[in-house]
């Protein structure tokens, strides 16, 4: 498939899990891809190798998403290295569980900095570079809609904020021909939420399909949303969750 030929993409948190799968899928579809990572430099290099194996240009940029300035710098480095920016995938995120009363203000600030402020910073900078046909894809969570566990209030708040901002951005950017959508995954087998982890049994039981999804499942939808085939989809929050929210 080459429907993204000539497109330039930035995928945040592309070293592991969902972000690595999205970066590789975009490259297979024809895009040059920059990724960001925090600590996993070897894993980030492996994603770059996969991008290059698909015959595309790839580069890895180290950032701390808790520092919005480094996210803004990564957007600009992508533009200078790849020669533009057509597709932004905000995927980097953290997941922490703590009940209210035990949560600290520092916990709150960190969740907002990584899962919300960094997403705002990337979009706010990227739209200065994007033209008609641009695509912004934000990785939220079904927890933006439902939080079936105790201790997840901050994470749910952060993902609800991503979906809400995306709706506003869809309105801002529609006249420029740029679409903005949120993908809301259910349980996906990654380091963040392993299919053999503590939550697995109860999460499996909540889905209609009875099992976790794979990073590839999210990457397929992200690649579709990035393509011209999805030109009329904007402002949507698309749940891809094995039926968890059915
Ligand atoms: P992983 O923990 O497997 O990977 C997280 C990625 O984000 C890594 O590339 C990591 O970089 C990067 N990252 C984390 N913190 C920072 C930071 N401070 N600065 C820069 N990069 C950072 O997560 P998943 O692949 O599971 O999750 C990806 C997205 O999908 C997240 O937004 C998550 O909330 C969301 N999601 C996941 C679900 C799941 O079940 N897995 C369900 C619903 C939503 P490094 O490797 O360097 O640490």
Image (cartoon, grey):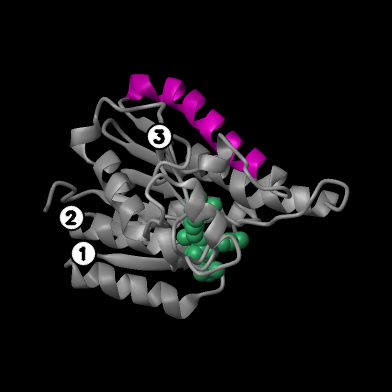
| Vertical relation: 127 (above or below) 118 | above
| Magenta span contains residue 169 | yes
Majority secondary structure in the magenta region: helix
- Residue contact at pointers 3 and 1, CB within 8 angstroms: no
Which of 109/60 is in front? 109
Q: Residues within 10 Å of mark 2 (few under 14, many from 20)?
A: many
Which residue is the site of mark 3? Answer: 181
Structural distance between the alpha carbons of marks 3 and 1: 25 Å
Q: Which residue is mark 1?
A: 56
Q: Which residue is mark 2?
A: 30
Labels 2 & 1 near each other (Cβ < 8 A): yes
Dot 2: what SS? loop
Of labels 2 and 1, earlier in sequence is 2
Give the CA separation, mark 2 to mark 1.
7 Å
User: Which SS class for mark 1?
Assistant: loop
Measured as percent of width and height from the top left, residue 157 is found at: 66, 39
- Start and end of the magenta stretch? 156-176
Horizontal side of 40 relative to 108 (left or right) equals: left
Residue 129 shows in this picture: no
In front of the other: label 3 or label 1? 3
Q: Residue furthest right?
A: 101
Q: Which label's residue is closer to the chain start, 2 or 3? A: 2
In the image, residue 1 lies in the stretch drawn in magenta: no
- Residue projecting furthest to the bottom: 42
Q: Position of residue 77 (x, y in %)?
A: 43, 58
Q: Alpha carbon of mark 2 to alpha carbon of mark 3: how far?
A: 21 Å
* Among numbered discs 3 and 1, the one appearing first in the sequence: 1
């Amino acid at each position: 498939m080459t429907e993204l030929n000539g497109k330039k993409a930035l995928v945040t948190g592309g070293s592991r899990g969902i972000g690595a799968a999205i970066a590789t899928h975009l490259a297979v579809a024809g895009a040059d891809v920059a990724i960001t990572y925090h600590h996993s430099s070897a894993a980030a290099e492996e994603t770059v190798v996969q991008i290059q194996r698909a015959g595309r240009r790839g580069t890895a940029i180290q950032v701390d998403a808790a520092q919005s300035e480094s996210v803004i710098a990564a957007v600009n480095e992508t533009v200078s290295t790849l020669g533009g920016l057509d597709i932004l995938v905000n995927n980097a995120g953290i997941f922490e569980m703590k009940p209210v009363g035990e949560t600290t203000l520092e916990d709150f600030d960190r969740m907002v900095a990584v899962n919300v402020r960094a997403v705002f910073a990337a979009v706010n900078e990227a739209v200065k570079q994007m033209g008609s046909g641009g695509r912004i894809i934000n990785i939220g969570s079904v927890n933006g809609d439902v939080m079936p566990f105790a201790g997840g209030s901050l994470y749910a708040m952060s993902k609800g904020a991503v979906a809400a901002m995306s709706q506003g951005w869809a309105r801002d950017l529609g006249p420029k021909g740029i679409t903005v959508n949120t993908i809301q995954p259910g349980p996906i087998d990654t380091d963040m939420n392993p299919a053999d982890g503590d939550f697995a049994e109860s999460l499996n039981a909540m889905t209609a399909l009875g099992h976790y999804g794979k990073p590839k499942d999210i990457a397929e939808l992200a690649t579709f949303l990035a393509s011209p085939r999805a030109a009329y989809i904007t402002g949507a929050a698309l749940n891809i969750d094995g039926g968890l929210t059915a």
